[in-house]
Image (cartoon, grey):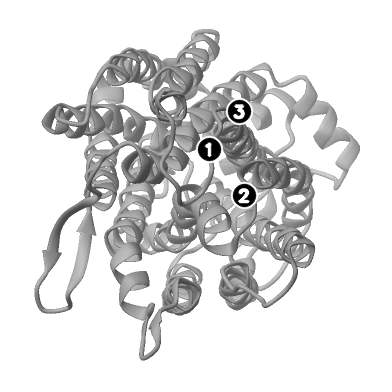
Amino acid sequence: MDQKLKFKEKAAYGFGDFASSMFWKIFSVYLLYYYTDVFGISAAVVGTMFLITRIWDTALDPIIGVIADRTNTKWGKFRPYLLWVAVPFGVVGVLTFTTPNLSLTGKVIYAYVTYTLMMMVYSAINVPYASLMGVMTSNIKDRTALSTFRFVFAFAGSILVLASAEPLVSYFSQTASGVDSQRGWLFTMILYACIAAVFFYFTFAWTKERISPPKEQKTSLKDDLKNLATNKPWFILLGAGVSTLIFNSLRDGSVIYYFKYYFQSQQAFQLPIFKVAINYSTLYLVLGQAANIVGVILAKPISDKIGKKNTFLYAMMIAALLSCVFYFFKENDLILIFAFQFLISICAGCIFPLLWSMYADIADYSEWKTGRRATGLIFSSSSMSQKLGWTLGGALTGWMLAIYGFEANVSQTIETQSGIRMMLSFIPAAGAALSAVFIGFYKLNDSLMNTISGELEQRRTKDKIEQEN
């Protein structure tokens, strides 16, 4: 019998991505800027650091998935990690945005160490968190609903950060002796870390694992990896996921530079009570996250009508086309800039609940085809696609800034400004188009998954009856 999830449990699952997305969005939007304009290292060095540290971290994700699959506690396989890693997650996040009084070489080493630790801790909590969805319910429509809850909360967490980060940093930077941006970032991250730890705890406390591996399944990493290597839908979705994250990370990482160095005035208006300026970049990013939520909400009704694959395909094609047009907007086309940000972000928002729901489908497909279930390993690949896309997008952002001649905190040349505009338009559009090409080869449509789900439910019911007898 399908397990119907109550609102409280769906919301609790969403709390986990509220917590992770706060940090994810800080990293994807502000970390490159923090390193170049506050911490004081070059864009090229940061781009290379992103590539080196994230490649290791991407390789770590499947290892975490394998370990989680073999974890057995009274709380289940995946939930315990939300309890164990929540506090280290927050602590290392604060250290990442701490600026020590070191030489340039010392700062680069510190950045490598803290960022590597941050990505390792991120994997240790997010791979089990992602895998949790695959064992909470076997109902494919309930999974899409669960994924929708997850991403509504994820984008809500992102909105909180994007709406408050720059004002909070500005507020905390005010000291008796002047402005201290390093202090501003440190205090802001302490606040975010406390919020994230609390939300992870509620996800642990209010969710439940219901699906276990088949009774007769023996622990075999070799068999799990062999089955994964022959799982064609997994490879296709991995390619689509990586391409989608390149698209998103390029756009996110370029926004601050776009408004700071292409616009003559960054400030949209000022909050009179706190005397804190609200910049166009903040409004642009918050609008994008709000549109992402609209896309997440639309994903389920649209995919119910035309299928997950077609929804994914059309959304990426439209996003690629709109992104190309975005390049031609000038500073005085403010309404069009914000309108296209809204439309592109709706398309991007549609993708994420579908992507994670499709990974849950792939876990079912693997069990149906092979008789073995490796939820953690398969879901670690979704985290791996996030990290790999984020890695390539982040590294490309840093390298392209260097190629276009970017120098921090000075006026940019026309060529550099044009390059920054390319990084918000044609270059991410290529990632969206590639994602659409990958998903065109995906074969697990909703009709086939209904059949697979029904057959698996019969097997589980039979195993349960045999166990009781």
In the image, residue 348 lies at what x, y percent? 35, 31
Quarter of the image for the C terminus: give it.
bottom right
Q: What residue type is labelled 3?
A: Ile
Residue 406 is marked as 1
* 223 relative to 14, above or below: above
Q: What's the residue at 25%, 44% (across, down)?
A: 284
Distance of label 2 from label 1 (alpha carbons): 63 Å
Q: What's the residue at 41%, 49% (across, down)?
A: 3
Label 1 SS: loop
Q: Nearer the observer, disc 2 or disc 1?
A: 1
Would you call the spot at circle 1 few (<14 residues within 10 Å), some (14-19), or many (20 or more)? many
Q: Which quarter of the picture shows residue 251? A: top left
Label 2 SS: helix
The residue beneath circle 3 is 403
> 406 and 272: which one is in front?
406
In the image, taking residue 86 as reference, residue 192 lies left or right, namely: left
Quarter of the image for the N terminus: give it.
top left
Would you call the spot at circle 2 few (<14 residues within 10 Å), some (14-19), or many (20 or more)? few
In the image, residue 59 lies at what x, y percent? 78, 42
Q: Which amino acid does label 2 sit on?
A: Lys
Q: Are marks 2 and 1 in contact (CB under 8 Å)?
A: no
Q: Which amino acid does label 1 sit on?
A: Phe
Q: Which quarter of the picture shows residue 304? A: top left
> 185 and 153: which one is in front?
185
Q: What's the residue at 61%, 22% (across, down)?
A: 239
- Which comes sooner in the sequence, label 2 or label 1? 1
Distance of label 2 from label 3 (alpha carbons): 61 Å
> 38 and 445: which one is in front?
38
- Which comes sooner in the sequence, label 2 or label 3? 3
In the image, taking residue 215 as reference, residue 239 lies left or right, namely: left
Residue 464 is marked as 2
Would you call the spot at circle 3 few (<14 residues within 10 Å), some (14-19), or many (20 or more)? few
